[in-house]
Image (cartoon, rainbow, N blue to C red):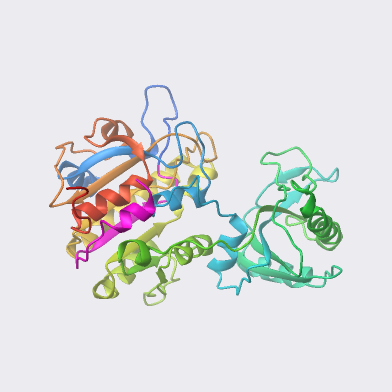
Amino acid sequence: MDIETLKELVVDSPAKIVLLVMDGLGGLAQQPGGKTELETARTPNLDALAAQSSLGLINPVATGITPGSGPGHLGLFGYDPMKYLIGRGVLEALGIGFDLKDSDVAARGNFCSVDEQGLVTDRRAGRISTDTCVKLCQELRQITLPGVEVFVEPVKEHRFVLVLRGAGLSDHLTETDPQRLGVAPLPVEATKPEAQRTADLVNNFISQARRILAPHHPANMLLLRGFAQHPHLPTLQQLYGLHPAAIAVYPMYKGLATLAGMDILPIVKAEGGSGQTIAEEIQTLAANYDRYTFFFLHVKGTDSAGEDGDFARKVSVIEEVDRHIPEVLALKPDVLIVTGDHSTPAVLKSHSWHPVPFLLASRNTRADGIAEFGEHACARGSLGTFPAREGLLLALACAGRLTKFGA
């Protein structure tokens, strides 16, 4: 069913929906026959909630397709990620509040490490500090390109945003990140003739950046991904009448939420806190609970640990989320979804195609009676394996926001 048809079924409701996303939640066992990170974690609260919920597995994009974070989240927000293609650069730019113009071309950048032969040894430059990122971006701002404005904006840790502004730019460009170690960064190539000038400009930028960054090991080179121009999505308010808000620490996810029309809530800092902890995110949810009907609550640590190949740390993040589940339930959401945007198994150190555990808790759903939240338990759930974009439909139905279809 397409979005326009769904709009005709939407009715108003005061019901509250909470979408709790543990980024990269799905995993794999370290040994054949073993347990995944989620199954290894001690999760008494999620297990108890699972017994009262409907369980299943979601495919973020399609069977066998490994999703990026953008498509993974768009599916959770109810969009068809194969139809709404959004480049990473736009998400990063919007996530830091950059005033992106329709004709701008944005790219997500990683500072990386290269050896004396120019081969990539660390795609994230050891996850340098954000303060170091800020200083390096200041140095890169000395780069000039003919006929365009150049913006280099820090994001977080090793991440930054490159934005080119000028007439006649195109985002039909290949990426420079080879996605593996021991090889050189790739040159940017135009995938359509009209993008050749933009490709030449970006390669010029990279050439100048290489000289500037050379003395700054481990961040002595950069990689560019996700060249994109500003898309225009119908918002969750326009589509479903939701009053949505997002609670996220990392800029990219704020960018995704912004595209979907969500208000980005400032994190409520605890005394002496960083404003980046799961506890502070839960406090932010509670502090704003009366103001919105839909909350997207994002936890990044599961994905970071998976990409670092740190099985134990991913388990620890899941256990930390579990300890806060009673605080979420105390708010009495009418619908609570707990899931992930994709799988990031620590044994693979990357995103993967594996279906993601999905839990739907509501007084209007049928409880499966399976007192465990994990990959194998969810595979036995009544929801089966289904496209991620249908999860929001289930939430809307349980919230009383969808009326009958047909006579």
Residue 110 versus residue 32 in the image, above or below: below
Percent from the top left, x then y, of residue 310? 49, 42
On the rendered structure, is 219 left or right of 56? right
Quarter of the rendering containing residue 386: top left
On the rendered structure, is 243 left or right of 224? left
Residue at horizontal 28%, vertical 59%? 18
Name the residue furthest top.
32
Name the residue furthest front.
407
Residue at horizontal 75%, vertical 48%? 192
Closer to the camera, 23 or 237? 237
Residue 58 versus residue 4 in the image, above or below: above
**How many marks do you count on the picture?**
0
**Residue 65 shows in the view:** yes
Percent from the top left, x then y, of residue 301? 45, 53
Q: Give the range drawn in magenta.
A: 1-25
Percent from the top left, x then y, of residue 1? 34, 45
Residue at horizontal 36%, vertical 68%? 245
Q: Is residue 71 magenta?
A: no
Q: Is residue 7 magenta?
A: yes
Percent from the top left, x then y, of residue 346? 49, 38
